[in-house]
Amino acid sequence: MTEKRIDSVLGQRTSYPTTYSPDILVPVERSLNRGYLGLSPESLPFVGADAWHAYEVSCLIASGLPIVGLLKICYPATSRHIVESKSLKLYLNSFNMSVLGTNRLSASQRLVEIVQSDLSKVLCTEVSVAWYEPNGVCSENNSLWDSYIVLENAVSVNISYYTEAPDLLECCGSGGRVQLCSHLLRSNCRVTHQPDWGSVYIDIEAHNLPNPHSLLAYIVSLRGENHFHEEICELIYCRLNDFFSPTKLMVSCCYTRRGGIDICPARASSSDLLPHLLLSPTILTARELRR
């Protein structure tokens, strides 16, 4: 497949395609940012996956009637590429005027088959895709993040850094395991520098835990950073892993929907720490604050 420039659609004025357009998908090398963090594909310090929720998906049935739904797209953190989100948005909208079946069931099944095949080819990995009806019932996920302490509700801190400052991180002087979150996560697109808003969830066990004030200050320091969502998640993971040498660590970032798509990456020191409800394509979890 011919390599496409990352800015071939992102940051450009583009028209929505009116016919099925798989060639519009743009893969982005994960190595571009992992090299900056000193990571190699052979020795990643985490396991994980990326879950994408596409809320603006539609096609036609034989009678000409449109159907609409939600697609949940999941693929592993070990994939060589991620898919550039604007190109995915344009690609999914290219189905809007395509007749894919005689009824809702056959059309939605065909849509899933095509999207799964196209993304697996573009990303050089196995991609899982599931379709959900607009009135589909979300699984109960109250237990997913309920135990997490919201940092900004629990501590106060003076802020003066808005570019990434890992030196802000401090130990609290005691060990154990804590689950912390913040809804103050904000970063910017690597190409357009447009703001991305999210919530970060951190599950950490260490002999010396993070000082909550310093952790909150560090999260806010990402406000001026220009990275994709997956890269921010890996950046936070690597900084915490390097500084605290935890025995267990999980970082998950749930970003606000933009262009009808939200992106929710998660990285962990072992697979049992991952939020499996969030990362399973066959389970639709209720939306979080930032989704």
Image (cartoon, rainbow, N blue to C red):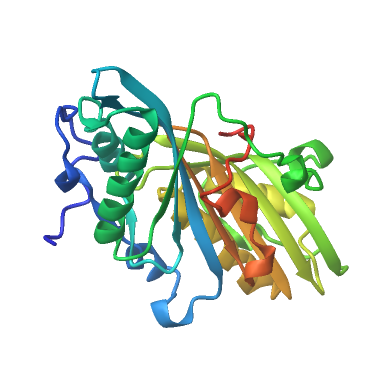
Residue 231 lies, in percent from the top left, at: 45, 57
Q: Give the camera-side residue of 221 and 231.
A: 231
Task: Find residue 191 and report its horizontal and vertical position in percent.
Answer: 30, 45
Residue sitting at 29 percent across and 65 percent down?
124
Q: Quadrant of residue 244?
A: bottom right
Quarter holding the C terminus is top right
Query: Could you tell whether 225 is left or right of 82 in the image?
Result: right
Q: In the image, 189: left or right of 47? A: left
Residue reaching furthest to the left:
2
Residue positioned 79% across, 65% down in the render = 209
Q: Relative to 176, is 54 on the left or the right?
A: left
| Of 187 and 14, the residue lying toward us | 14
Image coordinates for residue 65, horizontal then vertical, percent: 29, 17
Q: Is residue 141 above or below residue 260?
A: below
Look at 37% across and 63% down and name the residue there. Answer: 126
Q: Position of residue 160 (x, y in %)?
A: 62, 43
Of residues 146 and 10, the one nearer the viewer is 146
At x 62%, y 31%, the residue is 137
- Is residue 260 in view from this perspective? no
Nearer to me, 42 or 212: 42
Question: In the rendered picture of this protein, how many numbered marks are placed on residues?
Answer: 0
Residue 112 seen? yes
Q: Is residue 59 left or right of residue 287?
A: left
Q: Which residue extends farthest front? A: 102
Q: Quadrant of the N terminus?
A: bottom left
